[in-house]
Image (spheres, rainbow, N blue to C red):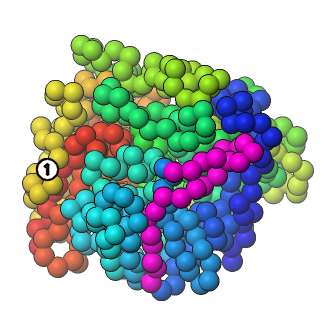
Amino acid sequence: MYSGAGHSQEVASVPFRHYPLDPVDTANFRQKLFVPGNSGPFGVLDVAGPLKIRATAANFPILPGPKTPISSPFLLYQTEHAGKAYQNPILRIESGSRFTASLDNALPEPTIIHWHGLHTPAAMDGHPVNTIAPGGRYDYDFTVRNRGGTYWYHTHAHGLTAKQAYNGLASFFLVDDDDQRRLAKALDLRLGVTDLPLVIQDKQFDAQGKLRYQPNAQESMMGWLGDVVLANLTPNAVQTVTPRTYRLRLLNGSNARIYRLAFVTGKKRLNFTVIGTDGGLIERPESVTEAFLAPGERLDVLFDAGQAQIGTDIFLKSLAFDPMENEGPAMPGMAGMAGMEHGAGHGAPGVASSRLTLGVEFNVLKLSVTAGERIVAKLPATLSKVSAIPLQGATQRKIELSLENMRFLINGRTFVMDEIAFDVKRGAVEVWSISNPTLGMPHPMHIHGFSFQVLERLGSPAQVSSSARFGKGRTAGDLGWKDTVLVWPGETVRIAIDFTHDFPGDQTYLLHCHNLEHEDAGMMINFRVQG
Ligand code: C2O
Ligand code: CU
């Protein structure tokens, strides 16, 4: 039931260093988008039975050039299934079924897999306490309790997460259910054809075309930004579309970069429809013209390519924004440090890296509209049911982000592997008020083990509140079930979490910033759900 285009790249006959990868210049977008097939790199693997996954270093062609010379340190999850080989497979599984996998560490350093967004027992969650040494193995065995949706998996070895994820250890984990199938049927969505998983990442490459990851002290503190933007590991990607509706399952798999996504043709911004967030479908389709996507978050959208004329191009862009907006009183030494002036002198020669700041608009993907039957989709009025978590008797808790001695902290703490920051009771409903005072730095906060609902945004910057139409300062990306929420400088975001679970005994999970440099630097705490 899978039909993808397979792994094909247009190979330009020029050395990498001469290939223009400037994502600001629309003329560069001529590299065919990598679309996952049913095996190979990012092949869709329908899970049936136990998997043996190996984390290893390997060659993987990302960039154009005569020899596509990406070698080590690209890191991949390799597996075989039903006679086919996969690298970083897109795992697909039915809600309610059992997932069994072993992870073998063939890397020269520790690693572990976290199933981002999944509600599993703590021992199955990829907490860094379960990191395995080189040559080690970890066995996973759990029931997929989540509803249908676009989840993902990635490395979580503390202190190494940023580097390992950047170098490749991440892919999708798609959960299917009746709601998902109903939608696919209604809109004729086929994975790999009209339903495209799309991971957006920014990277730096050296003159040989190898991934570069060498954060200095400032970049380790603020987050590593790339100057090349990849859609499914394709720089300057183009995808041919016909005048019909596509589903794009957008994942921000970047270490630190936040995207302000919009579809633009010429000067015109086009509508797109948010149908899902981190934890699956929202209740009703919501039409928007832009959405922020922070590291770790997913946004499921429908886009009607028939809004543009045949023969024209549409760009999925990241619009300019100001991460410092709303920061409150300026903090000494912070001005210009949020990556806004980032990158001068980095990247491949000829790449205008200093142009790819958060303050400029750049392109992620070109959609070329070609002739085809005009299909006007009738969106279902209702996508799914999302019941609000009942708040009576909820425990209120304050989560305060701060900066001390060049380190970002949560409730004054930095990560200590076996320290529990606080306990919650099994079955309790809690309301967390996450505040980010005067940091000049947005933080995408992620909770392991439990999805939550965004109740309210207070004190949002104007660039966020301008698209808030869902009451209490919320935007379309706040709707439904979430596992990661962006907290802007000056904001307080209130979320509700229901700690009901059926796992035996105490369970320890993480709360952390999904800016991976922040996480590795200790912006992470343990909390325990008491049994
Ligand atoms: Cu996707 Cu603890 O992270
Ligand atoms: Cu952070």
Q: Residue at x 71, y 48 (%)?
A: 67
Q: Is residue 52 part of the magenta span, yes or no?
A: yes
Tag 1: residue type? Val
Residue 89 appears in view? yes
Q: Main secondary structure of the magenta part?
A: loop
Q: Residue at x 30, y 18 (%)?
A: 334
Residue at numbered disc 1: 416
Comparing 8 with 269, the one in front is: 8
Apparent side of residue 379 relative to residue 125 in the rendered image (left or right)? right
Up/down of 235 relative to 168, above or below: above
Give coordinates of residue 527: x percent, y percent.
15, 57
Q: Residue at x 16, y 28 (%)?
A: 404
Q: On the rendered image, what quadrant is the C terminus found in?
A: bottom left
| Tally of numbered tags | 1
Apparent side of residue 54 relative to residue 266 in the rendered image (left or right)? left
Give coordinates of residue 34: x percent, y percent.
68, 54
Apparent side of residue 184 relative to residue 121 in the rendered image (left or right)? right
Corner quadrant of residue 4: bottom right
Comparing 422 with 129, the one in front is: 129
Q: Is residue 76 part of the magenta span, yes or no?
A: no
Give coordinates of residue 280: x percent, y percent.
47, 62
Q: On the rendered image, what quadrant is the N terminus found in?
A: bottom right
Classify 10 Å Cα crowding around label 1: few (below 14), some (14-19), many (20 and above).
few
Give coordinates of residue 516: x percent, y percent.
35, 43
Ligand 1 closer than 8 Å to label 1 CB: no
Mark 1 secondary-structure assignment: loop
Q: Which residues are magenta?
A: 50-72
